[in-house]
């Protein structure tokens, strides 16, 4: 009974929360959900949240984590017109010579480095961006 306050990145609203909300409400009708969708990583305790949904690399060391999804697979995409003009990148490193959309983290102000895996090893590529956003839904 009572209110469950959750903070989560905006992306998780449509992917996780929206599909599960009716099932949760049906199973726990005495619990009110107070959900804050925000790409900034907030301190759960300081901000009065009971729980938070985070991407794997955003979990604080003193938090207890429960996996909600399998690893997400991301793709590098572009329009046929763009690839006809600029050519298709043949490797992640080639993205440094392409027009990419960058993402800026709200808390730190730093830009996201694109993450890849090759031959079982993780690596990142910093892309130059003519467009940088701070919302993954754009």
Image: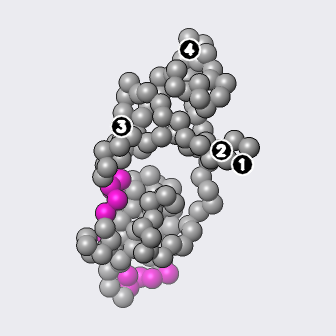
Q: Position of residue 113 (x, y in %)?
A: 48, 40
Q: Position of residue 127 (x, y in %)?
A: 47, 30
Give the CA distance from mark 1 to mark 4.
29 Å
Q: Give the range drawn in magenta.
A: 27-42
The part of the image, by quadrant, that contains residue 46 is bottom left
Q: Could you say which disc has been placed on residue 133 in the image?
A: 3
* Residue 100 in magenta stretch: no
Q: Is residue 6 visible?
A: yes
Q: Is residue 34 left or right of residue 97?
A: left
Badge 3 marks a residue whose secondary structure is: strand
Instruction: Report the residue marked by disc 1.
Output: 120
Please report contact status of discs 2 and 1: CB closer than 8 Å, yes or no: yes
What is the quadrant of the N terminus in the image? bottom left
Mark 4, Cα crowd under 10 Å, few <14 / some 14-19 / many 20+, is few
User: Furthest residue to the right?
Assistant: 119
11 lies above or below 56? above
Residue at (55%, 23%) from the top-left corner? 79
Residue that mark 4 sits on: 86
């Amino acid at each position: 009974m009572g209110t469950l306050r959750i903070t989560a990145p905006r992306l998780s609203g449509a992917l996780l929360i929206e599909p599960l909300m009716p099932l949760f409400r049906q199973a726990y009708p005495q619990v009110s959900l107070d959900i804050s969708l925000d790409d900034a990583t907030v301190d759960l305790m300081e901000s009065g949240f009971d729980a938070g949904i985070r991407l794997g690399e955003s979990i604080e060391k003193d938090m207890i984590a429960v996996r909600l999804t399998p690893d997400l697979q991301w793709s590098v995409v572009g329009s046929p017109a763009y690839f006809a003009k600029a050519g298709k990148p043949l490797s992640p490193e080639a993205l440094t010579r392409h027009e990419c959309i960058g993402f800026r983290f709200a808390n730190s102000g730093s830009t996201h480095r694109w993450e890849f895996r090759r031959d079982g090893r993780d690596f990142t590529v910093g892309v130059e961006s003519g467009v940088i956003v701070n919302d993954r839904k754009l």
